[in-house]
Structure formats: structure tokens, C-alpha cells
């Protein structure tokens, strides 16, 4: 009898090895490689077939379009992240840490869609029907036409869907609980997850129903993570949040039918997730503007401006090598700004500990935060409080020159909308829509340092602002 073929598959990224090893060379994770039977299934590669191909029909690119190709949920933050609604016949992956709120979000989305007349099937592989109902009651979603199924076998799920007419949306919570008769390995392995996902994606394309797959991000390699199906789906969204904070961000990382880098912002409460239409208000919520070391950064997340407070603490160090701790921003980027301040502006930080924190647990990924970070650092070191109603943005180059960043006009407009009166920005921004803010246009970081020390940033030149803080 032929021996069943096995291969060793990384549960984190799906890389295949001939023999077991401790570390996956593809993704660098340890202990994620698991032996799986490769008879059939996706990882086993195509089966040799004697079947002759049957010809399919070729279609013109300019063919008829379906009317209403998108189903909007009415939850604006979700629709924004999906690029204007869920596309019919598409497969969407929503990944996130266990307990972050994926099931909550999707239950709320299901009921919102059902209220708008869509037929939604919620397949729960993790919770029993009674548990799902209990949650729905808590979310005020119980009185809708959402249909439930507690099932984990892919063939059974597809048979049930086929027997009950074509739904508009199918939610599979979660892909890690799926198992298919076509694959022999245990549920939760890469082969099972991929086989199950592929069957459901095929169902989506053939039937025109949208399918949302939930995938838990896994720290250990015991079950396959959502990354192993990212390439198969049309859109990938990650639901993120910081421990200890109530807000959640739905981040688009791939979207075949819309923009990426979009975010939807939610707040988790006792009645489920609440939309946060204006994230700046959330992140600026607990701002105290009397202490030195705080600067408001006018940032962008995808197409939407987000204002966040950057807090710095610069204190004399008792250590041989001073500490540099940073939360919510890039540590190498902080090191660069510190080096430019030292080398180009004569700001001595070598004997100081530096702590940098982005308020609200937000994560900034833009280099445009350089100027705001520098302003916060200099303010903390000098003890000069920055003007409260002022925002900062701009990139800093190694020479100490400031560099314009994209979407400057939009950043300024958002600051204006939220009641800020001045902005410190790089000089020479092309085609800048100035608005009514007082602008300090800065050519070098040295100018910024001098202006902070002299308390002469733009705000104080205009009559409507509070008095200038004096350097201490
Ligand atoms: P859940 O949606 O089950 O997370 P996931 O599906 O991503 O694993 O959310 C679980 C967490 O959300 C849990 O810690 C409790 C919290 N939660 C609330 O705070 N309020 C609510 O109304 C609900 C339903 C959950
Ligand atoms: Mg869940």
C-alpha cells in the first residue's frame, strides 16, 4: 500500500518544508511547522487528472454590469473600510486577535444589513446558536431576519446554503473551525483552512453571495493564522485595538474593489461597537495642554485626517546609556529625530532619558510626524509649553531641512474644523490650500527649535489667541 504523503507546513505563513525544523525560514516564526497529510487539499498540489478540459465561454470585458454591485451595511465606518459597501460575489477576510470584537462587529453588521432587507446567514463554528442569540440580544440585533447555523463542516455548510436559496451575505465565524471532507489533516491546520476557504470562495463567485471569513490572529503556531488565506480573498481587513483602550480600528490592508489604507474607527461599549465618525475627538479627548512636552500631530490614516497628541518626556538620565522608550511610533524614526536635533540644532540629549508616547494608544506610521515629535521633545527639554491651539506636521530630513508631506491641505482643514488656530508646517508646500489658520512655515528644524524657545510660533502673532507662554 502506498504510504500517505505528508509534508511540513508553517501554520503562520503556509510555507511548505520536506522535513520538520524549529524555525520557519519564510516568516521567521518559531515552532510553527506542523506535519500535515498532503493527500488532496490545497497544500498537496493539483491532483493528476485524466479528465479532458471542457471549453468555457469567453466574455467581453465591456459586458453588462450588475445593478447595485455593492451592499452597504449602513454602518458608515464599516462601509468606509470596505470601500463603499460589500461587493456581491466577493470574499472578505476579517482578521484580528481573539476577543477583539470580530463576532460583535459582524453580528451588528448582519443585523444592520438584514434591517435593510438583505438576507444574511451567520455561520458560527465557535459558539452555539443559543450563545449567538444571547449576544445578539445584548446588541439589540435579535429582532432581525438574520439566519443562524452552528456548523463547521464545509460541505454541510454549502449544502445548507444551496438548499435555502441564495443569501446576499454569508458570515463564517471562523475559518479556523472549518473542516472539509476533501482534506485529511486536523481542523485548524493550513490545509484545512485553505481547503475550506477555497470552497467558500468558489461558492461566493458562483452564487454571487458575498462571503465574510473571520480569522483569528494566532501567536503560537498551533492553528493556522489568517495570513494563509490572504492571497485567496478579494479584501483583507484587520480589526485592531490596544489593550486597555476601548477603541477599535478596522484597517484595510488589501482590497480588490476599493482603496487600501482606509480605517474605520469604533468604540467598544456594553452595547457592542459604536461608530466613531470623528476619531480626532476621541484621540484628543483627554488632552491637558498645560504641561510642556505635548504637541498635536495632524496625521492622515488613508484618506482621512486624524489629529493625535504626541507626548514626550525628556529627563536627565542616571544611566550610562540613556533610555529611549517609544509607544505608538517607530523607535528608529525617534532615534533619527534625536540625532538631527543633536547634530543640526545643537540640542543636547545625550545625557537624557527620552520617553515618547502617542496618546490614546494610537499607532502612527507616517514620517510626517517628525516635526510634531521634535516639537514635543524640545518643549519637554526646555520646559516651554507649546501653544495649545496649534498643530504640527512635516517630515525632517537628515540634513535638518523640513520636507513637505502629502495631503497638507486636508490636515489643515481638519485642524481648523476642530478649533485649532495655528499650524507649524514645512515651508514650500506646493499648491497649499491655506485656509484661515495662522501658519508658521519652517525651513529647518533649527528654526523650529528657536521658535519654540522664543515662544514665537504663529499662534501668538494673531490677536485671537491666548497669551504666549514665557520660556522658563
Ligand atoms: P468578540 O466579538 O466575541 O471577539 P472575537 O469574535 O474577535 O473573538 O468580543 C469579545 C469581547 O468584546 C469580550 O471581551 C467582551 C467584549 N464585548 C463588550 O465589551 N461589549 C459587548 O457588547 C460585547 C458583545 C462584547
Ligand atoms: Mg468570535
Image: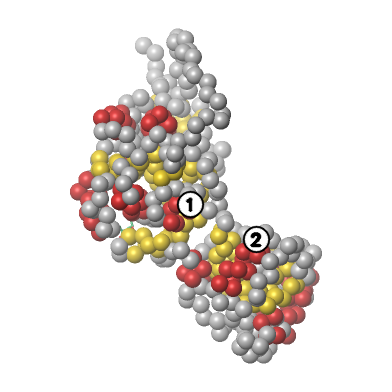
The circle drawn on residue 387 is none
Q: Quadrant of residue 157?
A: top left
Identify residue for label 1: 81
Picture quadrant of residue 89:
top left
- As rendered, which of 117 and 414 lies closer to the eye? 117
- How is this picture coloured? secondary structure
Residue 22 lies, in percent from the top left, at 50, 38
Query: Residue sitting at 55 percent across and 81 percent down?
Result: 289
Residue at left 48%, top 42%?
A: 235
Task: Indicate left or right for 462 with 246 as reference.
Answer: right
Whether residue 109 is visible = yes
What is the secondary structure assignment of the residue under circle 1? helix
Which residue sits at x=55%, y=65%? 306
Image position of 147 (left or right of 433) = left
Residue 98 appears in view? no
Q: In the picture, which quadrant includes the N terminus? A: top left
Whether residue 150 is situated above or below residue 341 in the rendered picture: above
SS for callout 2: loop
**429 with respect to 303 (left or right):** right
Measured in 3D between alpha carbons, the distance from the residue under mark 2 to the one under mark 1, in whole angstroms, is: 19 Å
Vertical comparison of 155 with 90: above or below: above
The first of marks 2 and 1 along the sequence is 1
* Front position in the image: 27 or 104: 104
Q: Is residue 282 left or right of residue 299?
A: left
Q: Position of residue 399 (x, y in %)?
A: 79, 64
**Cβ–Cβ under 8 Å for marks 2 and 1:** no
Q: Quadrant of ligand 1?
A: bottom left
Residue 112 drawn at (x, y percent): 33, 52
In this view of the protein, which residue sits in the foreground, 268 or 59?
59
Query: Which residue has dot 2 on it?
Result: 407
Amino acid at each position: 500500500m502506498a504510504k500517505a504523503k505528508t509534508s511540513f507546513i508553517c501554520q503562520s505563513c503556509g510555507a511548505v518544508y520536506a522535513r520538520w525544523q524549529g524555525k520557519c525560514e519564510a516568516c521567521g516564526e518559531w515552532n510553527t511547522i506542523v506535519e500535515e497529510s498532503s493527500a488532496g487539499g490545497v497544500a498537496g498540489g493539483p491532483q493528476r487528472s485524466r479528465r479532458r478540459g471542457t471549453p468555457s465561454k469567453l466574455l467581453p470585458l465591456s459586458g453588462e454590469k450588475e445593478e447595485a454591485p455593492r451592499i452597504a451595511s449602513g454602518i458608515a465606518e464599516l462601509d468606509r473600510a470596505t470601500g463603499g459597501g460589500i461587493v456581491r460575489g466577493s470574499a472578505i477576510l476579517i482578521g484580528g486577535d481573539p476577543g477583539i470584537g470580530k463576532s460583535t462587529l459582524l453580528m451588528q453588521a448582519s443585523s444592520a444589513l438584514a434591517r435593510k432587507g438583505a438576507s444574511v446567514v451567520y455561520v458560527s463554528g465557535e459558539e452555539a446558536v443559543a450563545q449567538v442569540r444571547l449576544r445578539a440580544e445584548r446588541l439589540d440585533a435579535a429582532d432581525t431576519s438574520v439566519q443562524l447555523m452552528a456548523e463547521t463542516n464545509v460541505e454541510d455548510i454549502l449544502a445548507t446554503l444551496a438548499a435555502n436559496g441564495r443569501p446576499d451575505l454569508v458570515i463564517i465565524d471562523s475559518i479556523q473551525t472549518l473542516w472539509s471532507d476533501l482534506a485529511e489533516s486536523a481542523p485548524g491546520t493550513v490545509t484545512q483552512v485553505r481547503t475550506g476557504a477555497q470552497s467558500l470562495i468558489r461558492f461566493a463567485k458562483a452564487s454571487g453571495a458575498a462571503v465574510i471569513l473571520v480569522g483569528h490572529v494566532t501567536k503560537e503556531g498551533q492553528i493556522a493564522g489568517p495570513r494563509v488565506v490572504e492571497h485567496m480573498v478579494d479584501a483583507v481587513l484587520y480589526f485592531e485595538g490596544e489593550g486597555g483602550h476601548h477603541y477599535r480600528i478596522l484597517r484595510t490592508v488589501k482590497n480588490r474593489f476599493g482603496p487600501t489604507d482606509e480605517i474605520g474607527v469604533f468604540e467598544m461599549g456594553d452595547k457592542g461597537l459604536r461608530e466613531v465618525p470623528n476619531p480626532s475627538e476621541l484621540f484628543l479627548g483627554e488632552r491637558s495642554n498645560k504641561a510642556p512636552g505635548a504637541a498635536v500631530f495632524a496625521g492622515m490614516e488613508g484618506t482621512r485626517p486624524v489629529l493625535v497628541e504626541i507626548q514626550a518626556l525628556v529627563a536627565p538620565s542616571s544611566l550610562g546609556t540613556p533610555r529611549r522608550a517609544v509607544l505608538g511610533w517607530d523607535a528608529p524614526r525617534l532615534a533619527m529625530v534625536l540625532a538631527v536635533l543633536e547634530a543640526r540644532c545643537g540640542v543636547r540629549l545625550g545625557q537624557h532619558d527620552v520617553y515618547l508616547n502617542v496618546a490614546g494608544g494610537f499607532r502612527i506610521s507616517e514620517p510626517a510626524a517628525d516635526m510634531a515629535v521634535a516639537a514635543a521633545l524640545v518643549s519637554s527639554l526646555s520646559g516651554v509649553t507649546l501653544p495649545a491651539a496649534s498643530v504640527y506636521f512635516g517630515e525632517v530630513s537628515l540634513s535638518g531641512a523640513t520636507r513637505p508631506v502629502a495631503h497638507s491641505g486636508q490636515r489643515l482643514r481638519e485642524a481648523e474644523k476642530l478649533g485649532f488656530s495655528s499650524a507649524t508646517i514645512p515651508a514650500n508646500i506646493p499648491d497649499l490650500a491655506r485656509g484661515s489658520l495662522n501658519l508658521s512655515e519652517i525651513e529647518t528644524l533649527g528654526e523650529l527649535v528657536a521658535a519654540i524657545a522664543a515662544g514665537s510660533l504663529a499662534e501668538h502673532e494673531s490677536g485671537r489667541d491666548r497669551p504666549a507662554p514665557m520660556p522658563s
